[in-house]
Image (cartoon, rainbow, N blue to C red):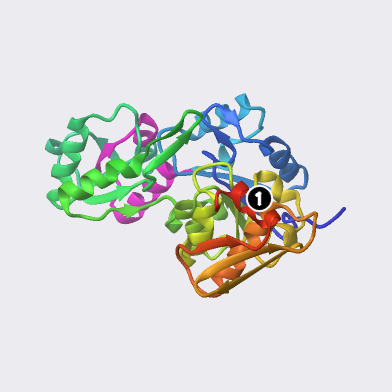
Amino acid sequence: MSRTLLDGHDVVLFDLDGTVYRGGELVPGALEAVREVHRRGVQVRYVTNNASKPDQAVVDHLAGLGLTAERAEVSTSAQAGAAVLAEKLPAGSRVLVVGSAALVSEVDRVGLVPVSDFADDPVAVVQGLSTEIAYRDLAEACLAIRAGALWVACNGDRTLPTERGLVPGNGALVDLLRSATDQEPLVAGKPERPLLDRAVRSAGGRSPLMVGDRLDTDIAGAVNAGMPSLMVLTGVNTPADLLFTAPDMRPDHVAADLRGLLQAPEEVAIGAQPGWQARVADGVLELARSAPEADALAALRTLCATWWATSSGPVEVRAADEHAKAALHELGLA
C-alpha cells in the first residue's frame, strides 16, 4: 500500500462543522476518508467548538449521516469549558450558565452547580451557543462578570457554517459581553489548547493530526498545541485566506476535502509542487506553470510556500501564462 498522510499518526482530530459535515449534509469525501481512518486502526476524535449539543447528540447526528461513532470519540467545547471550571473552582461552586441544556449537564457532571440568575451569587460564568439565548441571559451574565465572576467561553467562533451559509456563532455573543463588561474570558475551545489536549489524552495519542476548515480555530489550535495539521477547503476559509494568513494560523498541509488524508504526504504538503513555479519580485507574487498535468491546488501549495518564506499578509498575485491565470481564477486569486 502506498504511503499516505495517515501514516505516522495514531489519532486524527476531526473538526465537524465545515469539515465532516455542513448542517445535515456530509461534505464530499468525508464518508470514505473517515471509514478508512477507522479501518487502519487509527484513533478518531471529533473535536467540535459547538457547545450546544451533548456528545450523544453528536454521535446520533454522525450515525444519521452514515458514520459510526462512540461517545468516547466526541470532545465538545462544552466538556472542555466545564473541565476548565472544575480545575479552578471548588466542588459545589455556583456557575451561571449561558447556553444549552448540554452545557448545563456538563457543568453538573463535573460537580459544580448550574444557575441562571445573578441573584444566585454565581462565582463563575460559562458561555456557549444556544438558539434559545435571550437578552435576559446575557444581562444576568453581564452583571455576574462585572461583579468579578470568573468568565469561561466555550469557544470564540464568530460564525457557524450551515447548509444555508454562515450564521452567528458563540463568539458573536462573547463579543457582546466583552463590549459590555470590558473583560476577557478564558476560552476552552479552539484555538486554545484545553479542548485539543483533552481529546488527545482521551485517545492516548502521541502523534496527533488536526484536520479542520478554519484557520483561526482549527489550524491556530493545532499551532498552539504543537501538532501538525491539514486544512480542508470545504468550510469557512478560502484559498486566499490561506495564502494571506499569519504565521500562527498556517497549516502543514492543504487539500480539497478529507480525501487528502489518503494522499501521499508530499502531495498535500505546503511546499514547492511539481508543475508550478512561483517567485516574489517587486512585491508581487508570480505564478507560472511548468508541466501540463499540474492542478490548481498544487499551485496553491507552491504559492503559499513561496510567499510565506518571504513575508505574510495580502499580496498581489499575477499569472505568468494562461495556464497559471486559469489556476488563479479557480482558486479565487485572480
Along the viewing direction, whichever of 38 and 255 lies nearer the viewer: 255
Q: Quadrant of residue 9?
A: bottom right
Q: Is residue 67 above or below residue 311?
A: above
Q: Position of residue 263 (x, y in %)?
A: 76, 52
Along the viewing direction, whichever of 323 and 199 lies nearer the viewer: 323
Is residue 207 something that shows in the picture?
no
Along the viewing direction, whichever of 272 and 259 lies nearer the viewer: 272
Give the residue at x 35% y 55%. 87
Q: Is residue 190 above or below residue 96?
A: below
Q: Is residue 250 above or below residue 120?
A: below
User: Does the magenta run of residues contain 9?
Assistant: no
Q: Amino acid at mark 1?
A: Ala
User: Does the magenta run of residues contain 90?
Assistant: yes
Give the residue at x 21% y 45%. 177
Q: Position of residue 70 (x, y in %)?
A: 61, 36
Residue most toward the top? Answer: 64
Along the viewing direction, whichever of 179 and 226 lies nearer the viewer: 179
Q: Position of residue 25 (x, y in %)?
A: 58, 28
Mark 1 neighbour class, 10 Å CA radius: few under 14, some 14 to 19, many 20 or more: some
Q: Which residues are magenta?
A: 76-105
Residue most toward the right? Answer: 1
Give the residue at x 57% y 72%. 280
